[in-house]
Amino acid sequence: MRIAVMGAGAVGAYFGAKLSASGHNVAFLARGVHLDALRRKSLRVDSPGGDLVIQNALFTNDPGEVAAVDLILFCVKSYDTDVAVGALAPMIGNATTILSLQNGVDNADKIAARWGQRRTLAGVVYLGSQLVGPGTIKHSAGGRIVFGEMNGSVGDTTKSIEQALTAAQIPCEISKDIRKAQWRKLLWNAPFCAISCLTRTTVKEIIESDSLRKLAVDCMNEVMQAARTQGVDLEPELLDETLTFSKTLGDFKPSMLQDLEARKPLEYEAFNGVVVKLLRHAGKEVPVNQVFYGTLEYLDKKIREEAAG
């Protein structure tokens, strides 16, 4: 299978490396010093499940150099979705499928609006990985993908992608209700990413703090209300399940805290902005996510100003 990884960062490079190691022809699209290192030294993935070094692959920032592929792993940050969707054209053929492995609940819709729902899959990733230096990914835990067609069908192409992922030793599951799976992940991302950034705390510190844990629960309740505006019903017991899961993560730093510490833009729109937007549109109050959204917007602005010089 010919595969392109659009956004070969901590998520895309990890899964792309696994697929490349299993024999697929994988092209990695990256940029900046990370791309320079990939071209000079190859891609390295340090993992408790076995280290990988990918050398004989195409590392590029030009989709035209890749040409049409069978599968695109779409792994750019949510704030880059609109631009990246337009850049896919040279890699789209008659049989190309695009699998979004992004945070948030609406990225696959943006892809489908440009390239059609028939060729678009939405995915949810459960992975602990970090870009620790140009060309080097550190995988610490997890690596499962839940994905599915947006209309709930399960076609032959979706099944073939599941087979390819499984053969590459990537745990995966096809979901007939992928939108609910996306909202379930947002139930974790919205509180824990925001709180970790605003208080500079790990998941363990949040869980062990009565005040921060309560704040997380209040945020999750708003996420559940927002999901209902989209016809997605998240069961009340998911609150306790999410907290119980969080206890297993220890001193894990959520992805947005990693971005903040690296002075990279923040995905606050995808995590908290969508909750604010949906609940305001429904005429409901959204006090917790509104505060998260406003403060994270300020931090993001400062980061972008620093980057601009």
Image (cartoon, rainbow, N blue to C red):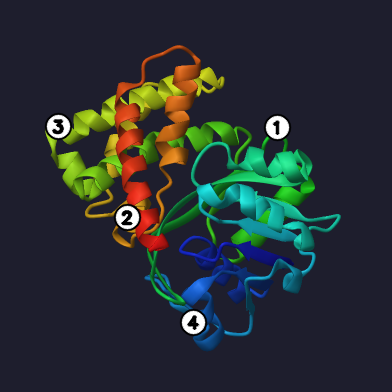
Q: CA distance from mark 2 to mark 3?
A: 23 Å
Label 1 residue SS: loop
**Residue highlighted by disc 4:** 37
Query: Residue 136 has which mark?
Result: none
Residue 91 picture quarter: bottom right
Quarter residue 56 falls in: bottom right
Residue 96 seen from this side: yes
Where is 163 relative to 181, above or below?
below
Q: Amino acid at mark 1?
A: Asn
Q: CA distance from mark 1 to mark 4?
A: 40 Å
The quarter holding residue 194 reads top left
For residue 151, which numbered disc appears in the image? Answer: 1
Q: Secondary structure at mark 3?
A: helix
Which numbered dot is residue 211? 3
Q: Position of residue 192 (x, y in %)?
A: 30, 41
Residue at the spot of label 2: 260
Q: Earlier in the sequence, mark 2 or mark 4?
A: 4
Which residue appears farthest toward the right when viewing the image?
94
Label 2 CA crowd tier, 10 Å (few <14, some 14–19, many 20+)? some
Q: How packed is label 3: few (under 14 Cα within 10 Å), some, or many (20 or more)?
A: few
**Is 64 placed above or below 96 here?**
below
Which residue is found at the position 36% from the left and 35% from the top? 293
What whole-number distance in Å separates the C-alpha atoms at marks 3 and 4?
43 Å
Comes first in the chain, label 2 or label 3: 3
Q: What kind of residue is marked 4?
A: Ala
| Position in image of residue 94 (x %, y %) | 86, 55
Disc 3 to disc 1, C-alpha distance: 40 Å
Q: Are marks 2 and 4 in contact (CB under 8 Å)?
A: no
Name the kind of residue labelled 2 in the image. Answer: Leu
Q: Mark 2 against mark 3, which lies toward the viewer?
A: 2
Q: Nearer the viewer, mark 3 or mark 4?
A: 4
